[in-house]
Image (cartoon, rainbow, N blue to C red):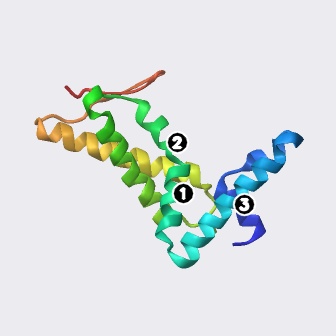
Amino acid sequence: MHQSDQLRVSGTSLAARAHPAGALALEKCVEDLDELWRRWLEYHDISAAMQLARTHRKLLVERVKSYTVPRRLSEDFIGEGHIGLIRAICRFDPDGTEDFPAFAIRHVDAALHDYAEFLLGERGRRPSMASESAGRKLAIS
């Protein structure tokens, strides 16, 4: 991985804006993420891919929270979001123009939407997603 890829792969354009006191810790975190990406891309190290998924779990949970679903389905949605996150890790091209968090959000959203369609299809309905300022609302009962 080249130095120019480092900032794009780990999505850390924050490094330039970091406070000097926290810059060292942020730089260490960036190095750790870059090492995980290197292990995954060069050696297909499954443990590196799983660590990358754990690192980006907050992004996943925030996307799931944007859907209003019954409490009993929230863990299922998180599981489906993990599938989207793993797909994003497997398909990500660090030489491309898109940073990983933006790329992952698209895959997580697609997995969540597919799962919502599946759930509603079982009930003989189509998913209705209303765009609201607070998030997306799924009519699942």
Which residue in the structure is indicated by mark 1? 52
Q: Which of marks 2 and 1 is in front?
A: 1
The answer for how far apart the CA atoms under marks 1 and 3 are is: 13 Å
Q: Is mark 2 on a helix, strand or loop?
A: helix
Which residue in the structure is indicated by mark 2? 59
- Dot 3 amino acid type: Glu
Tell me if mark 3 has few (under 14), some (14-19) or many (20+) residues whose alpha carbon lies within 10 angstroms of its own: some
- Dot 2 amino acid type: Leu
Q: Earlier in the sequence, mark 2 or mark 1?
A: 1
Q: Which of 107 and 23 is in front in this view?
A: 23
Query: Which residue is pictured at 76% across the width and 65% down the height?
Result: 4
- Dot 1 amino acid type: Leu
- Direction from residue 41 to residue 123 in the image, left or right: left
Q: Is mark 1 on a helix, strand or loop?
A: helix
- Direction from residue 53 to residue 21 in the image, left or right: right
Which residue in the structure is indicated by mark 3? 31
In which quadrant will I find the N terminus? bottom right
Q: Give the x, y percent position of residue 36.
A: 60, 64
Tell me if I can see residue 91 in this picture: no
**CB atoms of marks 2 and 1 within 8 Å:** no
